[in-house]
Image: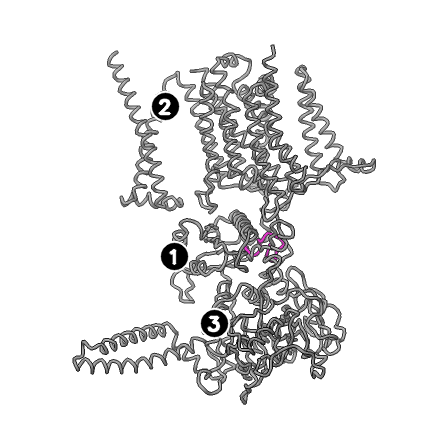
Amino acid sequence: MFNLSANEWVTLGVLAAVLLTALAVALALFGGLFQARSLVRREFSAYFLSPIAYVVLVVFLAVTGHLFYVTLNLLTASGPRGTEWPMQTMFADERFWLVFLFIPPLLTMRLFAEERGSGTLEMLMTAPLRDWQVVLAKYLACLAFYAVLWLPTLVYLPALLGARWPVYPTNLDEWRAALLPYGALFLGGLVAMLLGLLLLWPRLGTSARVVSLALLVVGAVAAGVGGWLHYHGPGPYVLEVPVAGDPYPVLATYLGMFLAGAMFLALGLLVSSRVQNQMVAALVSLGLGLVFIVAGFWRPEQDGGLGYQLLYFFSVPLHFDRAFTRGLVDTRPVLLYASTAIFCLFLTVRSVEARRWQ
Amino acid sequence: MAMKQRAGRFLSRLHFLVRFVGLTGLLVGCVGLVLAGLQGLLSSWQTARDAAEVALREHQAEPGTWLVLGGAAAVLFALLIEALFVLRLTAARRSAFGFNAVVQIALAAALLVGVNVWSFRHYLRLDWTRSQQFTLPADVRSRLAQLDRQGKTTIVVYQRHKTFGALTDKPDRYDYAAERKVVEKVKDLVEQFREAGPQFQVVVLDVEEEGFDDKLAALTKDAPELRHAIESAPENSIFFHARRDADQTKGEAGPRELVQQLSFNEFYRLDKTASQEQNNLVLLAQGAGESGRGVEPFARKILNLEERRPRVGIAVVDEWLSTRGTDIYGLAGLKNVLAAHGFDVRDVILKEGLKSRGLPRSAVATWEERRLDELDQRIRFLDSLIRRQEGAEKAWAAEKRDNDLDLADVRLVLERNRNYRAALVEERGKLDVDALREQQRMSDLHGKLTRLLADCDLLLVPRPTLYNVAAGLDLSLPIWLHNLDEEQLAAVRDFLKAGKPVLVCVGPPVDRPTARIPPGFVASDGLENLLSRLGIHFGKQAVLFDAENEAFSLRRLGGLTGENVTPVPPLALDWPPGAGRPTGLTSPAAGLSPHPIRSALGVTARSLGHGHPLELRLRHPRPVYYSPPPGPVSGASALGLLSSPPGQGPLLAASALAPGRSEPAGGRAKPPFDPEFLMTDRASWNEEKPFPTDDYTPAYSRTPDDPGRGTLEERRRGPFPVGVALETAPPADWYGPGEPKPATLRVAAIGESWFLIGPELSAAKERLVLDTCNWLLGRDDALPRGDRPWSYPRSNLTPGSEAQQLWLWGTRLGLPVLFAWLGLVVLLVRRLR
């Protein structure tokens, strides 16, 4: 049926095996996290009850707000000034990275160090959860708060992208044309996601939780597939937001920020699992984070030599300066962030485990 | 028990010692790395490895190398002992779990390193931009993939901080902003090329940077041609440098250097006029391709590193008019401009005997041939002089006049003459005397000129005549001085017949009132007739400008002595269709789109901004008209495939001309664009007697009994076309049966020649020369184009508007305050009992 060589079949087989394994691992982790949902909820809500989270939020928004101010001034400047890549002006700036450096340590310092310091870790360890579930639950909660931290910055986008008022079908015929065939799938997916989220709110039993999560996942898949097919079709569309700028660099930047944050948070979590004092945890993870950020202040010459390539490989600000903020997704930083995050989480699990046989 | 305790303490201290050694080794290694880096040993893996090998084999190395090696040895030793220690621990049953964990961590770490090393070498850059801004066009990528990945190409980005300010003395914020942006774009493009092939190395040279000289010296240590190219670059440029194996057939000893140059302007060009109008920075992407990002000119240079430089033959009547001629008449500036933009130049001398009192005779020689004769003459003269001076010195010395001042003077002069002679002999030694003598023996002028022009791609014929007649400086040359004889003319026609382009720059054929044309010479020779066969008609008068009236009056009163007291108005680049003809006459090309050279000059002019015209001023030009000769429709001309503007396919010509009152349409098809590309200002007139005398001052007045009335020679007010460039089918009667005939040939004429002369050309004149040469050579993609603008994106918010202020302050202050309020509320709620 397929005219493939033996090598190609082997490659396809290996890829399929890897994908199946990844899927199995993801399902197992998802199952484990579902068991630890109370811990996730507790850790996540703890952020909103702690003043440090609000301090982080306020400082973060003050800095990004100032950078937005600078960027918008350039976008409305007169004369030969301007910015070709607004996201670059905002997020490749040294000031942003100077502040960003402090955020993951502040978010992660309390995760284990506080429990260890106050002696509640032993109690947590007696819960009917495995070590990796504890670690992942804390990590997921922290990552979720990190994502929440970024949500207010979405407010900047209409101005940065030059968005105009949304356009939607105005009569029945247009609605019919917009909904068929993929618009309906897209909207249905969104409704299912919303329903799933709403069902998560009240305290319901396990079966209801499973249903709400299933609605969320199925809805996300339906919305993703339906949206892709709908918006790649000829139109009319159920909702269209005309933008003057290029939205893809924005997408790439947020993806990069999420992955970079995931790495720094995992690093902070590892440090927090090793020390008792929160301040020490914050300082050590700040020091480790500096390794990945310091080259951003250096601004080396892009000569293409090995030195520059190595520096670029490890420098998160350079990744954003040269790639993400300009709509380029480079697999090197993506893999670096993901692999370092996974490695740090693995070490954290081992670190927590080590307490049992010390 | 005590023994056991003592042994334990000993082992503990030993362990401490080993760890101390390891840590100290790490410190020393780091110091060594810093030193090695300063000594340049870490510039690549290869240099680092070589340094280590030299140190280990020959025991000779820099201190940095020793420190690195020593430190590494200490660290390795400590790690080995640590590993043994861990093994010893794992031997105990209690540590088995711990060992298991250590192995897992080690494996995970190895996986982490392995995955990242693999990704470092094999990566993808997914271009998510809407217009695929960071993706090279597929054809460029496929051609780059065919390049030798081992052969290194160095891309030098040379910032001289003179790009868009080259045309004006005072670069402004637009020029500087454009330069910064173009540097960014160059770096982006280089990065994309590097993704396509690891053989590209980039060096940024900034003349304002600290240590520029050292960096340049290091870069060009073994690359003299690159150094020469960098040093002679007039503006910000990008150089592409590579080495290839020596070409033994050309007798080259070492590897050949290949250097290509691209100025920033050939990549992106500033449109200052549009920038000022739009209150933005508007750059114009150059090059012929469709990327609109300047990729194509960049790729063309990289892919054609071995491209032969086009050669321009310059045919002049004497050495002093050549590119190595005098400051007053020489073309040194022209040569510099052409050389700096990738052309080779060859002088061809067409007369001899100009320095003697008699009339000049036709000849054909290279500058080197003439130089050889001159050197021989000077050496002979010096020989006789030195002999005389030696005799005098001997005689005076014999008279024991050692202390005589005259004798000392003679010795000094003698020494100076000997040195001078030695220098001349040395220069002569560098000439290929045998080959030059062989060339000099050729008496067949047609054959010799044909041979000299054979490897030229373009022939330039400068014929300066009138020189600022109002200023009183008597530098004007008579037109007859430039006459070509039949044999020379035949060689030029053969050059044209081969489809090679010719640029003729010829001033007005008018001379001083007292001057007479010597017998055997004519005012308008066969070259003009040759060009008229192709559709170029030269006017007989000089164009004078109203601005010169005052100068003429002052001259008459004896009040003007300077040279450039009255500047003439710059040439117009924008004129209505059909302009430049006497009333009632219609240009055969009226209504056609502008010539590519004119459009290119227009784009250059736009980089100057409002209120700053392109300083392209020609004094006393002669009108040059496009006037197709009567004849049958032929070849490409008939099909309307003569040529087309850059970026467009061949255009079908418009229908045959409507018959004008006195200009023949001749049944030929119209060219796709107006061949007339230079036009004088309106405030001018055509004058047959431009030289002011005691009883005559040139001035415009209507002449009712003008014999030229109704023709192109009619005395009238401006504007006048003074430049024509066309691509046309060569006349069929030039070719014998079976003789190969090119479909078209390109030819251009400009009605003035002094603009080419002098030790340097102004930026505007430089552009005129380059654009004309590039068009004639068919390099239309090298002409500035203005159809692909780039500018900064702008928000739809009006600056200073309420909406903008709301955005600015709402996000800068509103959001943080909102969350601060929320935090405080949460705090208050938590305190609630």
Q: Mark 2 and 3 residues: CB-CB less than 8 Å, in contact? A: no
Question: Is residue B295 located in the magenta-colored stretch of the structure?
Answer: yes
Q: Read off the chain for label 2.
A: B
Alpha-carbon neighbours of circle 3 within 10 Å: few (<14), some, or many (≥20)? many
- Nearer to us of marks 2 and 3 is 3
Tag on residue B86?
Answer: 2
Q: CA distance from mark 2 to mark 3?
A: 81 Å
Taking depth in this image into account, of B132 and B263 the one nearest to the observer is: B263
Q: Which residue has dot 3 on it?
A: B323
Q: Which residue has dot 1 on it?
A: B222
User: Residue A310 appears in which quarter of the rendering?
Assistant: top left
- Nearer to us of marks 1 and 3 is 3
What's the amino acid at mark 3?
A: Thr
What secondary structure do most residues of the magenta stretch adopt? loop
Residue, x 60% and y 72% (percent of image)? Answer: B747
Q: Which residues are magenta?
A: B285-299
Q: Read off the chain for label 1.
A: B
- Nearer to us of marks 1 and 2 is 1
